[in-house]
């Protein structure tokens, strides 16, 4: 009988996930400034249950996860699980116009459920069925990079059929085409991108532009009013770039040097604190003069405060994505692939981008978005221009041993 290494989570990994879902990107609900923060945080016991035992990967046939008994021809339906506030909604908030258009065009009914509040909680919800080789009741899910990588590695995602994805294959923008955890996008396609850049309150900086990590860490006029993020990949990744290192190809020595650079900022009290998405209120008020920030937040903050600016550092910025996957044993894989492809048609992608204000991964969408909102169409935080796209960098995948060691060092840095 084939043996598998258990896919355990270390104490350091659990602590990092806990930070993420309580204050970090996991707590960054979509359109977070437009709605009250909700539930979804796991207790320590709930988190610990994810590492209580080894997780045996699904058996593979060659390079393909266990296939489902696809019933798309007989059953014109899709069960789609997504994050809250991550789909276009009608003015009366009763319907989702793009999903209605898909159903009208294809005859496929979409059961759309907003039941993903954070990655960890959702993984705990579907893991038992996936580990047992059972249908989760979902044909399409949206999860962030690290969880997408885990699900694919365990053999719990179905390989997509390129013949069903002509728009997706042709229109996916280059910056998202080849993540190291899914080269060539064999198992996943991005729903949206998540960029980490520098934000600053020009009133708090007395008109000074802040456009580098070096400036965040060394400018004496910013001392005590600088924020970094509790998400390790964002804070360390941006620091690696500032030090001339590639976040997609770095050594432990490079990582330690970045940690040392940030530690100096802590020791000299240049850095006020490490934050999750709660930096938004401090930046808005000017208590933080400058910080690392997520692009989606900046767009929302700028709508109410013209003093909020952003900058793309010369060495580049960290980017990641939330990703569409078809779970193993889903009943309607071909239908799900049609829906993925539907959202890569520029007019449809424009409708979605106009509502959620995150990075659109679809090439050629600008003209259609301009018909809806010209300002959004000209915003490179939603539609990256060539100059911005060229500066995008992904943080490389880590081995379990690396992740444990790196998270321990980062936790010590931020006092977690």
Image: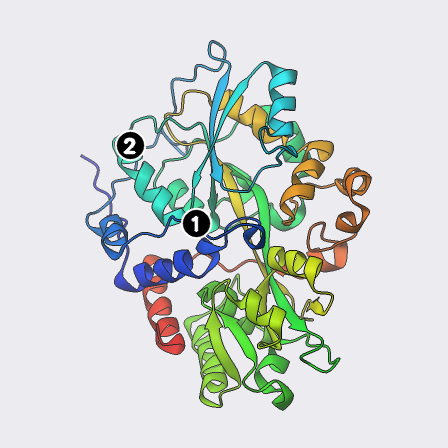
x and y percent of residue 164 in the render?
58, 24
Q: Quadrant of residue 399?
A: bottom left
Residue 126 to residue 273: above or below: above
Q: Quadrant of residue 369?
A: top right
Q: Residue furthest top?
A: 74
Q: Is residue 327 left or right of residue 336?
A: left
Q: Nearer the viewer, residue 183 or 286?
A: 286
Residue 149 to residue 23: above or below: above
Q: What residue does disc 2 label?
A: 129
Which quadrant: the C terminus?
bottom left
Would you call the spot at circle 1 few (<14 residues within 10 Å), some (14-19), or many (20 or more)?
Answer: few
x and y percent of residue 376 in the render?
75, 49
* Colour mapping used in the image: rainbow
Q: Nearer the viewer, residue 165 or 116?
A: 116
SS assignment at label 2: helix
Q: Is residue 70 left or right of residue 363?
A: left
Which quadrant: the N terminus?
top left
Q: Nearer the viewer, mark 1 or mark 2?
A: 1
Q: Nearer the viewer, residue 110 or 248?
A: 110
SS assignment at label 1: loop
x and y percent of residue 110 in the render?
52, 23
Residue 246 appears in the figure:
no
Q: Residue at x 72, y 83 (%)?
A: 206
Q: What residue does disc 1 label?
A: 38
Q: Spatial distance from mark 1 to mark 2, Cα to Cα?
A: 26 Å
Q: Residue at x 68, y 77 (%)?
A: 210
Residue 109 to residue 295: above or below: above
């Amino acid at each position: 009988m084939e043996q598998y290494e258990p896919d355990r989570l270390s104490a350091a990994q659990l602590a990092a996930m806990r930070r993420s879902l309580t204050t970090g990107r996991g707590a960054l609900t979509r359109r977070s400034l437009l709605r009250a923060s909700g539930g979804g945080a796991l207790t320590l016991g709930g988190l610990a249950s994810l590492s209580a035992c080894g997780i045996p990967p699904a058996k593979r046939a060659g390079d393909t996860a266990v296939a489902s008994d696809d019933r798309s021809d007989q059953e014109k339906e899709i069960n789609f699980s997504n994050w809250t506030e991550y789909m276009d909604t009608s003015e009366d908030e009763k319907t989702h116009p793009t999903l209605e258009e898909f159903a009208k065009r294809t005859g496929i009914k979409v059961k759309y459920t907003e039941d993903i509040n954070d990655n960890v909680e959702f993984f705990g919800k579907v893991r038992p069925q996936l580990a047992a080789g059972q249908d989760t009741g979902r044909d399409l899910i949206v999860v962030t990079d690290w969880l997408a990588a885990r699900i694919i590695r365990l053999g719990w995602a179905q390989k997509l059929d390129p013949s069903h994805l002509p728009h997706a294959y042709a229109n996916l923008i280059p910056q998202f085409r080849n993540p190291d955890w899914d080269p060539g996008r064999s198992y996943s396609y991005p729903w949206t991108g998540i960029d980490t850049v520098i934000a600053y309150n020009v009133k708090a900086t007395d008109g000074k532009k802040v456009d580098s990590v070096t400036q965040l860490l060394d400018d004496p006029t910013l001392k005590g009013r600088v924020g970094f993020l509790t998400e390790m990949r964002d804070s360390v990744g941006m620091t690696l770039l500032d030090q001339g290192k590639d976040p997609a190809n770095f050594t432990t020595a490079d990582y330690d040097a970045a940690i040392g650079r940030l530690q100096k900022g802590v020791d000299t009290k240049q850095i006020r604190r490490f934050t999750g998405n709660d930096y938004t209120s401090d930046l808005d008020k000017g208590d933080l003069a400058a910080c690392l920030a997520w692009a989606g937040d900046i767009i929302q903050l700028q709508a109410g405060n013209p003093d909020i600016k952003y900058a793309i550092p010369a060495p580049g910025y960290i980017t990641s994505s939330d990703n569409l996957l078809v779970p193993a044993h889903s009943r309607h894989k071909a239908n799900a692939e049609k829906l993925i492809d539907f959202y890569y048609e520029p007019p449809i992608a424009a409708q979605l981008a106009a509502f959620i204000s995150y990075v659109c991964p679809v090439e050629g969408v600008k003209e259609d978005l301009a018909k809806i909102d010209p300002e959004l169409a000209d915003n490179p935080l939603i539609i990256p221009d060539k100059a911005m796209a060229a500066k995008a960098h992904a943080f490389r995948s880590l081995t379990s041993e690396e992740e444990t060691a790196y998270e321990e060092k980062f936790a010590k840095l931020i006092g977690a």
